[in-house]
Amino acid sequence: MAWPVAGVVLQVFVVVAGAPVLIALMRQVRARLEGRVGAGLSQPWRDLRKQLAKEPMAPDGSTVLFTTAPVVVLSSALLIAATAPFVSTTSPLDGMADLYAVVALLLVGSTALALAGLDTGSAFGGMGSSRTLTVAALAEPTLLVAGFALSVRVGSSNLASLVEHAQRAPSTIFSPATLLAAVALWIVVVAETGRLPVDNPATHLELTMIHEATILEYAGRDLAVVELGSAIRLVILLGLWGNLFLPWGVATTSTPGLLALGAIVFAAKVAVLGSVLAASEVLMAKWRLFRVPELLAGSFLFGVLAVSSSFFLA
Amino acid sequence: MSSALYVQLLYLVCGGLLLSAVLMLWRRQLSAIIGLLTVQGVLLAGLAALLGTRDGGVELYAVAVGVLLLKAGVLPAVLRRVLADSGAVRETQPLVNVPASLLAAALLTLLAYAVSRPLVDLDPSPTTHAVPVGMVMVLLGFFVLVTRRRALSQVAGFLLLDNGIAATAFLVTAGVPLVVELAVSMDLLLVVLVLQVLTARLQATFGVTDIDELRELRD
Amino acid sequence: MTLVGAGLLLVSCAAGLALLMAMAPSARTRGFVSGALTCLVGLGGVLAGSAALLGSTWSATATHLLPLSQGELTVDRLSGLFVFLVGAVALATGVYSMGYPQAPRHVEGMVQPAHGTTSRTAQAALPLFAAAMVLVPTAGNVTTFLVLWELMALVSLALVLTEHRSRPEVGQAGIWYAAMTHAGLVAILLALVILSTEAGSESFAEIRDTAPALSSGTQSLVFVLSFVGFGSKAGLVPLHVWLPRAHPEAPSYVSALMSAAMVNLGLYGVLRVGFDLLGGGPRWWWLLVLGVGALSALYGVLQAMAATDLKRLLAYSTTENLGLIFVGVGAAGTFAATGQRTLAGLLMLAAVLHTVNHAAFKTLLFMGAGAVLRSTHLRDLDAMGGLARRMPFTTAFVGIGALAASGLPPGNGFVSEWLLLQGLIHSLPVSGTPDVAVAIVMPLAVGAVALTAGLGVATFVKAFGVGFLARPRSAEAAAAAEVPGTMRVGMAAAAVACGLLALAPLAPVRALESVLGVMPSIGDRRPVQGAVELRLSGITGSMSPLLIALGLAGGAVLATVVVRGLGSGRPRRTALVWGCGGTRLSPRMQYTATAYAEPLTRVFDDVLRPEHDVDVTHYQESRYLVESVRYRQRVSDRLETRLYPPLLAAANRWGQMARRLQDGSVHRYLAYGLVGLLLVLMALGVTA
Amino acid sequence: MSLLGKIRRTGRVAEPALPPPVEEPGQPSGESSADIGFRGSVQVRHVDAGSCNGCEIEIASAFGPVYDLERYGVRLVASPRHADALLVTGPVTHNMRDPLVKAYEAMPAPKRVVALGDCARDCGIFADAYGVFGAVSDVVPVDVSVPGCPPTPEAIIAALRGLSGR
């Protein structure tokens, strides 16, 4: 019993400590591709340290919701980091949340920020919040249908058993169903984490923002919490994708060695996926907001193809 | 090769065909559509070759080579020339907007699965299980023909349709006789050439390759 | 005399007292007493219902009470569930309604409209309505059922019309409601009469035994007719049109009763007729139900997402939730028809659990909307805002309701939606080829449910965020004040119910599982095991709402403590909103509900077809200088505007023809009577 | 893809890092970044209070690939709420005075103001123009001021590195 718990702790630690580093890594990749040097891998941690020391602010007329939203984002992310199989599939908390519960928890985070954006009473906040939920709402069908495709053959939507099943039968990973689901979920990951071409995380123009616009009013430690929370969400989404479609290395029995290996492999996976994401961002431009439904409809189609081909091509 | 590996490869090829067909519906860049057609030709040839390895028939390899030459070589080349001649680079406004047509494609897939069930039940084998893929390609080909405006996308839809028929034929009967396949491919080539001429004429007459302009010929 | 009987007796006595109460002189006392009596009705319902849910059955017959028939009441677990639901809703609304009425007031010159009413009819009608609803599920034979059903319809109509003096739209809404509910009644009447004549008896008990012998054609006819009738009561597309009209115009406690209790009786009817009396039936019935349910869910949530009238939004959300429930029922029936009882049980459980959840949070939300309406006279979200500081209690309650309605953890809506999804995703076999219909329907159903859930979140974030947070957008909203204690107690009761359902869903689940036993094709097995975690039996899948809630709370506390510890304890400073240095920021520059829904409205343009009009007024000096720009967007119910006008036109034409029959001569009218009598006698002579 | 090829051919264009800042340049207060609590991270909100855009061009090139100011932990941000330093250019015109004050008030403490260019320091060539209210220091307290018309990227970098301490 001791080691599974240790596994959970390790997992949470890896995710939390690694999240800002992932952000830094992605900025670094981008910088290198642009011929720059970049701020280094520890920069986000410096930013967080500084913001923690700064004074938090709340816009006039906002309610308690504005000040609690960052904490909700962070805690929902932490909860997922503790339950989902990132480092090991033997988490004692495994039974409390399956794929759909995790999806719902992610949505809780976005919803909290969306409410906070409205609570600021600034037009930017409202705009960002409305756009966030537009994307989230349209991404929902893909998420669930692709999850459906993954869980059909396993007969369960429990994340740990999905990963273990994929480890037992690697050939299923190369079946069309899984590959189509992978494409569909990748599109959703891009949309949910607010990367190009859906949202531009580096923009300075309020009118083109989605995620940034909702947190425009946060300062000091609130901002630090929000930044950390969304960084963890990025790790979670990339990590889930990585473990569902590249399940190797996840510890299925919690012995110290396997846990350590699992942690290392997980970090490597997320780092690679993040770098790929960042590199692909250099090659594309942001789309109009009203072409995003096109992207999500496409991903939904891939989801449906995944489900249907899971019973005629497998 | 082992049967498990064979099935795996077969399904991967079929998945690739499915994917390319769907992407043809999604992409509006005509050059991208032609690229997808090329990929599709290669996959189709691969499918034929794969069946050949199972049956060990020389004929199927020949078909594979023919398909490769025609569908991954000649036809795309012709289409690229058409594209070069007509200035149109992208399907500007299809009659059905893209998200809607993607959702329609989802429904068509499920429909294809439903209608091809009887075929599959005739003799259930890994090969026939994949028949719905061919069906989907046929339906999507029709859909493209119905909803696209540019003459070139019409040709693309037509080719998708034909690829679908070929794929279905391969999967159901493990390959049509060599002669038939070649004949089909030949008149296919003919059709494409005719359409190329047509496009050139459209270009010359109306300055665009929007086939809706053909209405003007009525009176 | 069992507890059930006692409860029902209490219900009837309270209803009787309501008639006496109408004679009381003072309006205030009348209002109070009518609320109290409604509570009594609710109490009786809760007692009877819970007793019945625990398994005590009860039946009574009153011969000679009804002509050519007899009043017959029988209570089993299924009726117990709905008696309990209605009772609970009535209990909360009763308390709430005591504080609701408000005479028209004159504030700085302008007269503010009345809320609720002091009219004797309406005050007497409230307990009667509750009582009628409690009694409908206990009806033991066709005639009793129809009589109670019609009583319920008439009394509710009277309640919808309560405020017709102060606002003309109310009359319009009343007409729509009356028309739709009676169209529904006709369908139900036909269905049940055919059923009872074919089965040779009108008592449910005997129909239950003889119905399976009926020809499948008759069964299908009966089912489809009753589905139409009950569907219209449940607000399913395309018969939902009365909801978005009646709910906004009725007093809010009436809307709560109708939307949280009455619509469920539509579900009761379908379950009773389809699963109990007809014992399951073929698969296509339930595929039909599933399809209609999915359409209702999607259409309802789309309209709710675009709506800016708070109560209209809630009405459409009722259509959405009933749609989800019927998706569950339809899927359950589909699998019951093919004998997959595990799945059927799980899905049916999800459906009834969602019914309970919906009753809880919809009561709460309509009460909240009523509280806002009463203290601000506003239903238009675009004019609200900033209520959180002025009405903290109401805001907190509505927040709980909105969380539940958006189906997010740790709300109670999430539990039932999760169960529904589990049922749907396990519908395909792990290996081998699935049945074609299932393989095609289920992915689409999952997609529909998912899109509904996603849009539901957007809808309720809009409703809560725009309506209650930030700064007030109008003088009325700025002048808002918290509502009286009784109303708060009513809302608190519903909120507590939501909380219990969210954190400890297993207790209600145990009770609901026993209900499944009433439906032979499903049978009472336990789809869900476990103490803290909901473990699905026969399917690997588990989720623990309690642990998730605790985890969220714990994480929040932990994060707060750590951040406080690390950060320098600088106090939070309140500053002006950052407007890019803009100097004249006004609350009117906040995002409105219309703006909030705009992107999604544009994405679903083809379904919603919003009507925009922009008028720009220029300074007369130069048309390059804009004085003001005015933008209006209206999203009308397209099903209503497309589907109903032709029907109404046809009805008119028939009316014109019918006019020829009446020319004012009394003799001719009497002649009609004579002819009619002769025809009947002849018919009897021929058949006998 | 041609773009990838170009990226590969171009390679790294950033010049080697300049020597780390001595406490002297543009640090009249003499406080180190650690005292302020920035410790190697400074987010900058830029306000053009009426500049001729000469300084803007220099800022752009300072953040561009060649000088790559970001490598010293300095980042431009969109919202003053996220910012530690207010980078003001140009003389403060009457119309920009109020927005400048608002931007300053919108920033969370601790915060620093950098007046960039001669105009920001003493209205430069725009002194006594009818539209000009005054220098930046007449409106908000200035902590660091960078001379030059326009200041060279090196000067801008030195000033901001003084704040970030990297």
Image (cartoon, rainbow, N blue to C red):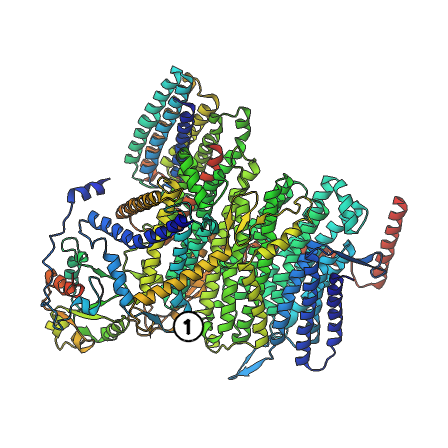
Q: Chain of mark 1?
A: C
- Give the SS element for disc 1: loop
Q: Position of residue C512 (x, y in %)?
A: 63, 54
Give x and y (percent) for residue B83.
30, 35
Whether residue C423 is visible to the viewer of this picture, yes or no, is yes
Depth check, front residue: C411 or B118: C411
- Horizontal side of residue C570 vs B12, given as left or right: left
Q: Quadrant of residue C510?
A: bottom right
Up-down relation of residue C35 to residue B105 (above or below): below
Badge count: 1
Residue C400 horizontal side relative to residue C515, left or right: left
Q: Is residue B146 left or right of residue A248?
A: right
Q: Residue furthest top?
A: B58
In this orientation, which residue lies closer to the viewer: B164 or A45? Answer: A45
**Residue A38: % across, % down:** 20, 53
Q: Position of residue C63 (x, y in %)?
A: 85, 59
- In the picture, which quadrant includes the C terminus of chain B? top left
* Quarter of the rendering occupied by the N terminus of chain B: top left
Looking at the image, can residue A194 be seen? no
Q: Amino acid at mark 1?
A: Arg
Above or below D162: residue B37? above
Q: Residue furthest front?
A: A2
Q: Residue at x 33, y 31 (%)?
A: B38
- For label 1, the crowd category at 10 Å Cα-Cα, with few meaning under 14, some 14 to 19 and many 20 or more, is many
The residue identified by callout 1 is: C471
